Amino acid sequence: MLNTVVLKINWQGNAVIAFILSAIETGVLFKVFNCNRENLRVFITLNFRHLEKSRSLDVTELLSLFLQGTVIWFCILVFYNFVALIVDRSEHALFKRVLKICIWTCFGIAGWLQITNLYYMWYNEKFLNRELVIFGFQQLGYLSWHLKRFSPSLLLIIIVTVFGVLSITQWGLLKTFRRTNCFFSPKMFKLLGVAVIVYIVVFNVWLKQPWQYQKNGIITMASSSLTKYKIIDVVGDYSLIPKQRKINYKGHSIEVPIIVICIESMRHDLAKYEPSPVPFLASLIPQSIFFERAYAVSSHSIYADVNFWHSQFPLRSPKFYRFKHNSPHRGKSVFEVFKALEYQTAYITSQNETWGGMINWMKNPGVDFFYHAPDHQGKTYLDEKDDGFAVFAKKIQTIGSIPDTETLGVARQWIANLRDKKQFFLGMNLQNTHYSYYLSEEAEMPFQPMKEFEGMFGAWPRKNLEIVRNRYLNAFYNVDKLIENFVLFLKEERIWDDCLFMVVGDNGEAFYEHGYPNHAGPMHDEVARTFALIKPPRKSNIKPATISFPVSHIDLTSGILDMLNISQPYSFQGISPFSKARKYVYLYCDAMKRQDGIIRWPWKLLRSYPGEELELYNLDTDPLEKINHALENKDIVSELIKRFDKWKNAQLSYYTQPEVYSSYYPPQFE
């Protein structure tokens, strides 16, 4: 099983220099992969041999590299052979060594770029499986498609360069190696060039078909950390609240137990399925405040989860934002609010909160009892199909997720041991419903057909759609039963009637409605819009209802406080849906795709990078987002872009100016 790959070059020459350079190269790659020798599973050793030292190059090794890297490794091979010709004809030893050092430096840079830009290939447990080969070929087409749309001149330059590289490669290899294999013949390279051009043409024609969702592929990955913004005077343009001002919670007397359950990948339409995969949760809707249009702040959990509990927007940096310990950006969490009200607090989660550094913000002073997967002594599971997290967990020698039945067991035990069952705040995160949808041996499976399937997160084959979706529905059916049993426990403890009970999905889940599966990418409604309800306590003045206007998840956190007449911290950016309807809902993701999103009902605008591709949907007349109105409604596009950019500029101006964020709370938006 492949955990990581190390490329090591064995030079036929000075053994000392070869050892030193090999050690440097291996060290760089260990640093890139953030692994140690115990994690290492596979070594690929390439022996580049010169004419006088060997009769041929190992074609299998070269072909494997070509299939993985497609471009970069092949270009470096060409460069090596070109330099080898110069080195061989030189009589100066120092000159030879300098050239060798240069080629090693270039190889290291290329390795870094390859690992960074094509990380999806490397984060996979199988070496050269079918999905990776398909992924590699797709990227060649997507790259050419992107260049054709946004930079035709650059595409022409690349085509000319490719022909030049092929010619140099042909000449270099024929001069460097004996012609013992037809792989390096001139005819083979001409056929290769023609095949690539034909493939690119066919792929681009295929992408023009109306049913194809046009993705940017690796070019998005390479550019996902880039953005442009205009630094503005946040203090002058916004009435920021100085940090000297604080909310005083002393004197508040509240006796309402609060339980908030965040469920992974919970789509907004699960309650509408027939038969229902969540019959118990659906039965709670008539006695709850049901949020018909609740939107996560992002499409991936690292941003969506942490910011929900802190009631803040996720956009804090032009690059991917990592939650750091003692970050000056962290405001108060909802746990800290209730801790100040002398509540007992707990965050009990099935997931490993070290993923993305979430633990640095979630394990905060407001949490009396913090419990996540590494704290668990019982059964845990690691989903081998969740390639990103699976590899990450193995690298840091930790574990995956806790089955939700055990997480809820820990929560029951914590509640049972409380000295005061009227003043506690419990936050939970359930993970059985994350791809590939954990099912225990005792699980019920009413949705059929269903069977085991292969495929990476975000890239499993469309032909498996029915069985994958049924497994997803079965996972929710069983989690729904677990929640029903947990509510029975609350009733036995005489907590249920008096408690505020909230269930919300951290994000949704796609099943190729717009050409992609799972989440962490584009923010169409199947991914960004989630199930959300709040069952109010019996004595609440707010009665069951359905709220139809769009709300952000950070508004729900504010709504909990508003429902209990508690002032929210100044660091919160949410607007309680019980006091005011938000005019604009802001969305932002920076994972498998970088995308901006804004909703001003009924219009929803998505802007993808690079290239600023625009999608405008009327959610009232087109709830499935099938018709893009961006071209014929340019005035609406202009209005929403202007509004989003104002929000983006304020966020980035605030978080990138230490003199501002150290003295003021974050800006507020309507």
Image: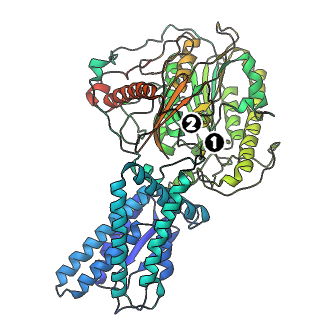
Q: Which image quarter is the C terminus in?
A: top left
| 158 horizontally vs 601: left or right | left
> Residue at point 60% right, 31% down?
529
- Residue shown at 64%/56% (left/top)? 455
Asked whether the viewer can see residue 28, the reply is no
Tag of residue 513: 1
Q: What residue type is labelled 1?
A: Glu
| Tag of residue 524 | 2
Colouring style: rainbow
Given residues 605 and 7, the one toward you in this image is 605
**Looking at the rendering, which quadrant does residue 257 occupy?**
top right
Residue pictured at 40% horizontal, 58% vertical: 32
Residue 62 spot, x, y in % from top left: 46, 77
Q: Quadrant of the N terminus?
A: bottom right
Q: Where does residue 352 sit, x and y in percent of width and height?
A: 56, 44
Q: Residues within 10 Å of mark 1 (few under 14, many from 20)?
A: some
The residue depicted at 66 percent of the width and 50 percent of the height is: 381
Left or right of residue 256: residue 310: left
**Amino acid on which disc 2 is placed:** His
Q: In this image, 351 relative to 322: left or right?
A: right
Among the 4 quarters of the image, the one containing residue 542: top right
Residue 54 in the image: above or below residue 214? below
The front one of 223 and 532 is 223
Q: Which of marks 2 and 1 is nearer the N terminus?
A: 1
Q: Is residue 126 above or below residue 328?
A: below
- Which residue is more in the foreground, 319 or 469? 469
Secondary-structure class at tag 1:
loop
| Circles 2 and 1: CB atoms closer than 8 Å | yes
**Helix, strand or loop at mark 2:** loop
> Which percent across, then down, holds residue 461?
65, 55
Separation of marks 2 and 1 at Cα, in angstroms: 9 Å
Percent across and percent down for residue 458 are: 58, 50
